Image: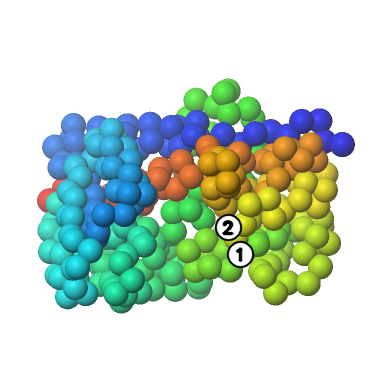
């Protein structure tokens, strides 16, 4: 039996990443450059979306970014949202654009995401950036999958997080020979996580609702990533001794508690490392949004002499 799993504290890891981003921004501004700019478009009054946007803007300002929010009513048309995206595309002081999802049902998210400049895509959801991931080219990567990979790196680093003072101490893990299973095949998480694991030389299985013998598949995996949105779907006894378990799922159960796809209490008795829910992948997703925005800024502004857009 695993001697107590390492709990992968995404909140603490995200704090390290934000600290590094803040240091880089402070240096750029002290050198006479403008700060990075994040533009956020919120359509409608969805309380969860408003809360998420407020958190993202607060985090952006905390690391030294400028933040601009455009709020539109539920009744906004496709054209009206597209026009606002184009306004942000045209602003040289904006380096990252976030279209908060989900959108009202009458709007096409796919079409609107395509309107965001690939150079200002902070979520990594533009088809061009998704295609660049597919072929292994440089590009903006999706936030949640990047957060997943950084948590995997932490698991394989062998160092307790409270002993790590700089996120650069956590190196990219070589996963050659490691069997990985990704449960979920969405374009937002499942598929890009699988591709990123492949980039690290892992042997990857993608599972989904039609997969036969899921318990057997999971029990073979050194790395388990679950992103299906079903509470406690992954049973603790399925987990291989010493495996790394990354739970992307976040589900609210009848009691009002937030839980993951994995039976955490049972799984942590077998896993070598595991993320909690909440406090695991979620904080890393927001931190990676800031990372992408800063990366766009570094590429679009700093390499253009500090005045660019």
Q: Can residue 199 be seen in this view?
A: no
- Tell me whether circle 2 and circle 1 mark residues in contact (CB < 8 Å): yes
Mark 2 residue element: loop
Task: Answer with mark 2 or mark 1, whichever residue precedes in sequence.
Answer: 1
* Residues at marks 2 and 1, CA–CA distance in whole angstroms: 9 Å
Residue at 63 percent of width and 27 percent of height:
160
Q: Horizontally, is 212 left or right of 301 in the view?
A: right
Q: Mark 2 points at which residue?
A: 229
Depth check, front residue: 309 or 152: 152
Q: Locate residue 99, reporting x and y percent.
A: 29, 60
The part of the image, by quadrant, that contains residue 196 is bottom right
Residue at 73 percent of width and 34 percent of height:
5
Is residue 179 positioned above or below 285 on the image? below
- The single residue placed furthest to the top in the displayed view is 163
Residue mark closest to the camera, 2 vs 1? 2
Residue at 52 percent of width and 61 percent of height:
189
- The single residue placed furthest to the front in the displayed view is 254
Q: Horizontally, is 106 left or right of 165 in the view?
A: left
Q: Name the residue under label 1.
A: 184
The part of the image, by quadrant, that contains residue 117 is bottom left
Instruction: Check the picture and name the quadrant holding the N terminus.
Output: top right
Q: Locate residue 142, reporting x and y percent.
A: 44, 59
Q: Locate residue 185, reporting x and y percent.
A: 58, 68
> How crowded is the residue under tag 1: few (<14 C-alpha within 10 Å), some, or many (20+)?
many
Q: Locate residue 103, reporting x and y percent.
A: 32, 65
Residue at 53 percent of width and 68 percent of height:
186
């Amino acid at each position: 039996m695993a001697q107590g799993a390492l709990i992968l504290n995404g909140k603490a890891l995200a704090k390290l990443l934000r600290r590094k981003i803040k240091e880089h921004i402070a240096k750029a501004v002290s050198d006479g450059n403008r700060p990075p700019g994040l533009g956020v478009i919120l359509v409608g009054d969805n309380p969860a979306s408003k809360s998420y946007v407020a958190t993202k803007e607060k985090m952006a300002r905390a690391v030294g970014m400028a933040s601009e929010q455009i709020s539109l009513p539920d009744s906004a048309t496709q054209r009206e949202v597209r026009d606002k995206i184009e306004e942000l595309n045209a602003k040289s002081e904006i380096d990252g654009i976030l279209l908060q999802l989900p959108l009202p049902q009458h709007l096409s998210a796919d079409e609107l995401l395509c309107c965001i400049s690939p150079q200002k895509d902070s979520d990594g959801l533009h088809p061009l950036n998704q295609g660049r991931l597919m072929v292994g080219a440089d590009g903006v990567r999706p936030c949640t999958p990047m957060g997943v990979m950084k948590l995997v790196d932490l698991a394989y680093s062998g160092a307790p997080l409270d002993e790590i003072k700089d996120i650069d101490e956590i190196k990219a893990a070589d996963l050659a020979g490691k069997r990985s299973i990704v449960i979920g095949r969405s374009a937002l998480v499942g598929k890009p996580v699988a591709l990123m694991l492949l980039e690290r030389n892992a042997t990857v299985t993608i599972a989904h609702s039609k997969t036969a013998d899921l318990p057997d598949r999971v029990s073979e995996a050194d790395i388990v990533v679950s992103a299906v949105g079903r509470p406690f779907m992954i049973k603790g006894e399925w987990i291989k001794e010493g495996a790394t378990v990354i739970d992307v799922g976040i589900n609210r159960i009848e009691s009002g508690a937030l839980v993951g796809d994995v039976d955490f209490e049972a799984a942590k008795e077998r896993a070598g490392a595991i993320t909690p829910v909440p406090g695991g992948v979620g904080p890393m997703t927001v931190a990676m949004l800031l990372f992408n925005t800063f990366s766009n800024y570094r590429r679009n502004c700093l390499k253009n002499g500090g005045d660019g857009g």
